[in-house]
Image: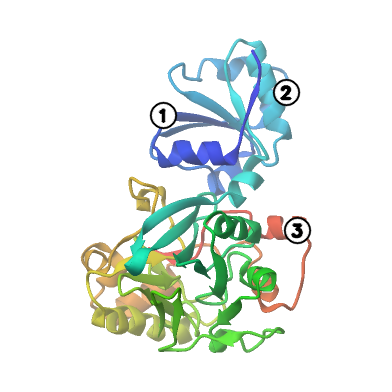
Amino acid sequence: MTVKAMKASEAAKKIVNNEPFFILDVRNGDAFADWKIEGRNVQYLNTPYFDLLDGVEEVVSELPTDRDILVVCAKEGSSVMVAEMLSEEGIDVAYLEGGMKAWSEHLEPVKVGDLQGGGELYQFVRLGKGCLSYMAISEGEAAVIDATRMADIFLDFAQEKGATIKHVFDTHLHADHISGGRAIAAATGASYYLPPKDAEEVVFDYTALENGLEVAIGSSKIEIEALYSPGHTIGSTSFIVDQQYLMTGDILFIDSIGRPDLAGLADDWVGDLRESLYTRYQKLADELIVLPAHFMIIEELNEDGSVAKKLGDLFKENHGLNIADEQEFRDMVTLNLPPQPNAYQDIRKTNMGKITPDEEVQREMEIGPNRCAVR
């Protein structure tokens, strides 16, 4: 049988569509346990490549006959060899082109909804990393929020939609992934906005993103209003878009809340985090649709692949929004923290403009799951 290559985009479609899917992951066990392709209808088998060098007979009996099989490794090479060995045994399999590195970089665009006056809002779902980026389009103009470093994806998408990117925002100085905001702004001449309290150490020019700022795109005046909401970082800023959507950055997620420790100031910022979630957000309309900058678990995806839920529902369902005792809240977000993101200090320095790693180094810096949340 011929061994097929499956692109990350094809695998993403299967995940979003909840198709039956089987993954034979041939990375080492610790790498698999730390980070893998996730989906509601995915079955797994983790057998390291080195255990299969003498033959694949031990795994053949464990492979299904009623669903597609994808062999996965870190960069592609090992999965190609295992897929070829399985093919020689008469098993129809594919390998993930580019391996987990390619999976980490894929963005799946999903239309979130329409804006007043004919505009549209899109969410870019980075399934392999848990990152969520956005593009609002109105009458040939676009704004991008929390872009990943794969800037060409946003530039190409805007071109396909016949839109010119006029504004680029980062809700905060990211620590888990490298921002593409400055690259997009440089390529388009757009204004690049960053909260000034997060930008005290940056070495580039930016436009201050401050509380109450309103930026319109298109003649239909789709307003993007800034709402200061510190806690994940001291400058974290949310957006209300078109009076319909609340972009929360890394303050509030669908199933969790943001961690306050990535600048080493958890004890200092936990009070800001609680005030943003329990006071500032409580004053907002329950009907606002929350659009976060990350998701943590695959169950946060809706049936259409989007990550979104009404604010009022989150105040009922999200554990992090329902801790009445302030000390209990403080303990949860300072004593119950997950491992910090890989290379997060260098990622922060990159986003400040202090260091400029090459493309391959940037890939390595970002490898791994989303670690921005506390739940």
* Element class at badge 1: loop
Image quarter of the N terminus: top right
The residue that mark 3 highlights is 359
Q: Residues within 10 Å of mark 2 (few under 14, many from 20)?
A: few
Q: Amino acid at mark 2?
A: Leu
Looking at the rendered structure, the kind of residue marked 3 is Glu
Under mark 1, the amino acid is Pro
Q: Quadrant of the C terminus?
A: bottom left
Alpha carbon separation for disc pair 2 and 3: 32 Å
Q: Image quadrant of residue 166?
A: bottom right
Label total for image: 3
Residue 322 found in image quarter: bottom left
Identify the mark nearer the N-term, 2 or 1.
1
- Image coordinates for residue 142, horizontal then vertical, percent: 51, 68
State which mark lies toward you, 2 or 1.
Answer: 1
Q: Nearer the viewer, residue 210 or 160?
A: 160
Q: Position of residue 127 (x, y in %)?
A: 50, 49
Residues 7 and 63: in front is 7
At 48% from the left edge and 63% from the top edge, which residue is drawn?
134
Q: Pointer 2: what residue?
A: 53
Q: Do callouts 1 and 3 mark residues in contact (Cβ within 8 Å)?
A: no
